[in-house]
Amino acid sequence: MTNALSAAAAGFGTSLSLIVAIGAQNAFVLRQGIRREAVLAVVGICALSDALLIALGVGGVGAVVVAWPGALRAVGLIGGAFLLVYGVLAARRMFRPAALRAEGEGTGSRRRAVLTCLAMTWLNPHVYLDTVFLLGSIAADRGPLRWTFGLGAVCASVCWFTALGFGARLLSRFLAKPSAWRVLDGLVAATMIGLGATLVAGA
C-alpha cells in the first residue's frame, strides 16, 4: 500500500512539474477561464488528451521494457538527459521571467475554442516528449506499479487544468506577475534536475 501511494505521488508530482511550465496550452486555458468561454470543453479536452497520452506512454514503454530489458537503461539515460535539459531551461526562465498574457482577442465561438485547444494539444511535439516518452520512461522504472504512477500523473493533469480553467478569474492577477512564474519555474527546475540526475545515475 505504501509503495502504491509512493508511486502515485511520484506520478502526480512529475506530471504536475511538467504541466505547470509556461506554454501556449496553459496560456490558452487561462485566457478561456478568465473570459468564461467554453471552459468545461477546453478543460475536458486537455485532461482527456493527457490521460490518453499518458496511458500510451505507460503501456507502450512498459511493453518495450518487458520485451527488451536493456531498454530500461536506454530510456533512463535519454529520459534523464531530457529532464536535465528541461530543468536547465526552466532555471533559465526563472532568471528571465515574463508575464503570461491572457488578454487579447477571444476565440469567438465554442467550436473555434475546441479546435484551437485540440490543435495546441495534439500538434505540439513537446506533449509527446513529455507525456508519452518522458512520463512513460519514468513509469517503466516503477515496474508493476507503473500504472499506479500513470494514474497519479493523470490526476495531476485533471487537477491542474480544472484549477487553471475554473480558477482563472481568481488567479489572473497572480499569474500575470513575472515573479509568480519565477517561483513556479524555480520549483520545476529543481524537480526536473533532481529527477533527471537520479534517472541517469540509476541507468
Image (tube, grey):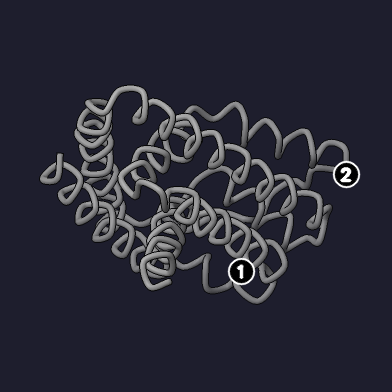
Q: Quadrant of the C terminus?
A: top left
In this view of the protein, which residue sits in the foreground, 59 or 183? 59
The label shown at residue 193 is: none
Mark 1 Cα-neighbour bin, 10 Å: few <14, some 14–19, many ≥20: some
Left or right: 153 in relation to 161: left
User: Based on the displayed image, in which of its 4 quarters is residue 43 positioned?
Assistant: bottom right
Q: Earlier in the sequence, mark 2 or mark 1?
A: 2
- Picture quadrant of residue 138: top left
The front one of 103 and 154 is 154
Q: Is residue 24 left or right of residue 41?
A: left
Pinpoint residue 58: horizontal percent, then vertical percent: 47, 39
- Measured in 3D between alpha carbons, the distance from the residue under mark 2 to the one under mark 1, in whole angstroms, is 21 Å
Residue 53 percent coordinates (x, y): 57, 37
Label 2 SS? helix
Amino acid under label 2?
Answer: Arg
In this view, the residue farthest toward the top is 68
- Residue 172's disc is 1
Q: Which residue is at 81% across, 50% downward?
A: 41
Q: Is residue 140 above or below residue 123?
A: below
Q: Which mark is residue 110?
A: 2
Q: In the displayed structure, does residue 34 sit left or right of residue 151?
A: right
Q: Hey, what amino acid is under mark 1?
A: Ser
Tell me residue 103's x, y (percent): 66, 55
